[in-house]
Image (tube, helix red, strand yellow):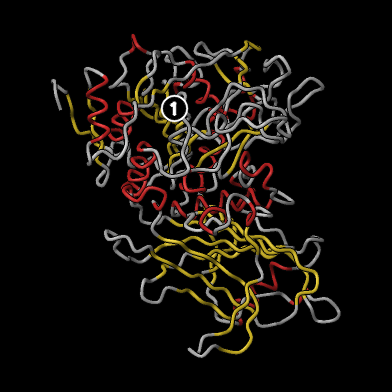
Amino acid sequence: MRGSVESRQLNYGTHLQVFEIVCENENQLHQLSSFVGTQSINNFSEFGVETQAIPVGHVDTDNFPLPNDELPIVGLIDSGVSLDNPYLQAWIVDRDEEDVPAIDQDNSHGTFIAGLIVNGREFNHGNLLFPRSRARIVDVVAMPKGGTNEYALLETIRRVIPKYPQVKVWNLSINANGRTCQDECFSPFAIALDEIQQQYGVTFINSAGNHNHLRTWPPSESLGEQDRIAPPADTALGITVGSAAHLSRDNALVKQEEPSPFSRRGPGAAFLPKPEICHYGGNLDLRGSCFQLGIVSLDCNGKLVEDVGTSYAAPWVSTIMAHLRAGNISANLAKALLIHSAVLRRESIRHSDFIYRGFGVPRDVDDISICQPWNATMIFEPQLQPVKRQFDRSGFPLPTCLKNPNGSYRGELFVALVYDPPLSPRAGAEYCQVNVDVSIGRRSGTTKSGRPKHRSEINLQPKGVKNLFESTQVTHGFKWSPVKVYKTSFNRLEGDEWGLRLNIMYRDHPDMVRQPQNVALLVTIADPDQEAPVYNEVIQLLNQRGWSSENLNLNSRIRQQAFA
């Protein structure tokens, strides 16, 4: 290449080679693009955060909570929590501002998010839509007031994750400016975050990002790719959170529970379901104002202010997730519990809003952990072996209390499957190297190999998923996706012999080493009339059929019946 060129290799992970190159002229750029070793060229994404909060009042100082050491910790990677805020400092376990000196800080965005983690429901008038869970905070100042670039932000993240090994959940309400995710590849930033999550056993809760178009619901026009999720929300292993409206009025753009007008949509790269879930981040009126439609939290000086954004939907999820991980359960299981709880809240999952809301709004941690008498949730965490490629259990417990007079069954099945596949950054859209499927259904006879004949009775969600994008399973059937949800309602289902089966498939990439795969699977059997004693009878059946069972203990309380 003619002329001097400055370059350095950047640390984006073990298997991803990224170089920063400074070109002096356009000719050098053309030469670089024609070099056989160049796979792609992009400018580094820029990141910035801002608030346009509206003052709304003062804090009730007499009723502001104090922290205790039993509460879990959320890592907050943002613009920092204001030292001038008199209410939040007691909740800060530690503060890291090594990469952003005080003179370069504007703590408005980080302070607002911290207020939601600490006391969000009370700030929002005790609205029961919001979780009552609270968490303490590790405050990482990563975002200077003028914004930063992708690699500087990544370097901060790489430094602080091992510094705080007690923190398993990190809130990242930061999205790239002017860039959206792509079908054919994952963003380098998302790939780097996935490697960090695998290495340290942590989970990043990512906001889906905001767009500037005033979208109504249902959308009156297509925005093309302009409202698609923004990196790093395309991580395969993290949780991406969209926003829904918690309030509405006559001049609001959307109704309560509908996707917020500013919330970005999925799918993710390789058609992965993104966002997986949503929470409440506010609404706008026809003029684009959030007055009396937004989320209320704190400003830098401790006053109550109102604002909107997917940035403020993510911390509700981070707090719930931190409570789940505090119960010493795996990241897979905590993620599955979160998604499963959202599925149980919704009557149906329609594709029209799935790409905006995912599987819905998750329950608070106390509600996640409760089984009602009319349902029973089974939890499986098997390790699937490369040689066997299957996990199979006969004697699936369909309770007789769900039998019709003619001997057929009625009821509902809800299933959530989450796993953490090996990942190949060089494989583009084939990034996820393992596919796991689950089926629950009737058994009749055996195959030539001696295995039970098995017919699945559960349907992939959302409804109509097979018609979502293109004509293949890879693009419309969530094949290779590390998150899958199934749901079935039945009124006259025949057969008493049922089974559960998990199948694993590996890609054939040269650098793929086939290893055992951990999965988390949740299965709920329910009576839609909420009358039959499903819970007690399922336990009896499991004990009779030799399926081991134990209680799932979250935060030292007996929560939800779990079966392995």
Q: In which quadrant of the rendered view does residue 389 lie?
A: bottom left
Q: Where is residue 127 in the image (x, y as percent from the top left)?
A: 70, 31
On the picture, is 340 further left or further right than 515?
Answer: right
> What is the secondary structure assignment of the residue under circle 1?
loop
The answer to whether one can see residue 409 in this image is yes
Q: Position of residue 437 (x, y in %)?
A: 52, 65
- Of the pair 99 and 218, the residue shown nearer to us: 218
Q: In which quarter of the image is the N terminus?
A: top left
- Of the pair 300 and 44, the residue shown nearer to us: 44
Q: In which quadrant of the rendered view does residue 153 lie?
A: top left
On the picture, is 190 further left or further right than 87?
Answer: left
- Circle count: 1
- Of the pair 415 and 374, the residue shown nearer to us: 415
Which residue corresponds to the image point at 55% horizontal and 81% vertical from the top-left?
546
- Residue on which disc 1 sits: 176
The answer to whether one can see residue 363 in this image is no
Answer above or below: position of 12 versus 325: above
The amino acid sitting under disc 1 is Ala
Q: Where is residue 445 in the image (x, y as percent from the top left)?
A: 61, 89
- Of the pair 138 and 422, the residue shown nearer to us: 422
Which residue corresponds to the image point at 27% horizontal and 43% vertical from the top-left?
16
Which residue corresponds to the image point at 60% horizontal and 53% vertical from the top-left?
340
Which residue corresponds to the image point at 55% horizontal and 77% vertical from the top-left?
547
Q: Position of residue 280 (x, y in %)?
A: 64, 32
